[in-house]
Image (cartoon, rainbow, N blue to C red):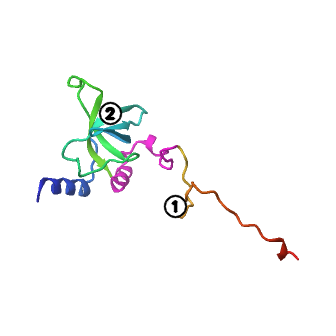
Amino acid sequence: MGRKQKTANQILITNPIPTDSQRIARVLGGRGKNLHEVQLPEGNTSLCTLPPKFRNLVWVKRGSYAIISPIESEKRENKIWGEIVHVLFPEHVKHLKSEGIWPVEFEEQKDSSSRGETVDDDSDGLFVNTNRGIVEEEESSSEEE
């Protein structure tokens, strides 16, 4: 079993729990060169790096969550605040919520998209093309006679 395969199994099988120094953060987007902008539960935004063992193995999408390990302030000479230790999948989020570790600040924002639009809960999951106008057919007057 190679290094990438062991890392992939570790990501999928284990249920990560952040230590006292680690934080859960929401990924706001990639900034290039394996840097990602993240938002902490307090609302602060900062840059975090993706370590080489995760590169080309896990893609971090906007709106996903990750466990961040902060870099010590004595070593930090640039704007990078921390390092992504674990990318959280929906199963991991459910586990953290059941353990009571999940930040309350991320609970209330789960139904909003990246543009700030709300998603209806009663939608059937079909894609709606917003580039086309909605055409409603009117009943003809000949049926009334």
Density class for disc 1 (Cα within 10 Å; few <14, some 14-19, many ≥20) is few
* Residue 22 in view: no
Which one is nearer the viewer's eye here, 140 or 2?
140
Instruction: Write down the region rendered in magenta.
Output: 89-115
- Looking at the image, the residue that sits furthest to the right is 145
- Magenta span has 105? yes
Tag 2's secondary structure? Answer: strand
**Looking at the picture, which amino acid does disc 1 mark?**
Phe
The image position of residue 52, as x and y in percent, is 19, 43
Dot 1 falls on a residue whose secondary structure is loop
Residue 134 in the image: state x and y as whole percent.
65, 59
The 10 Å Cα crowd at callout 2, few under 14, some 14 to 19, many 20 or more, is many
Q: Residue at x 13, y 53 (%)?
A: 3
Q: Quadrant of the N terminus?
A: bottom left
Nearer-N-terminus badge (2/1): 2
Residue annotated with mark 2: 47
Q: Which mark is residue 127?
A: 1
Name the mark on residue 37: none
Q: Is residue 52 above or below residue 133?
A: above
Q: Residue at x 36, y 37 (%)?
A: 38
Question: Quick check: marks 2 and 1 in contact, CB under 8 Å?
Answer: no
Q: Nearer the viewer, residue 65 or 117?
A: 117
Residue 20: x and y in percent read 27, 37
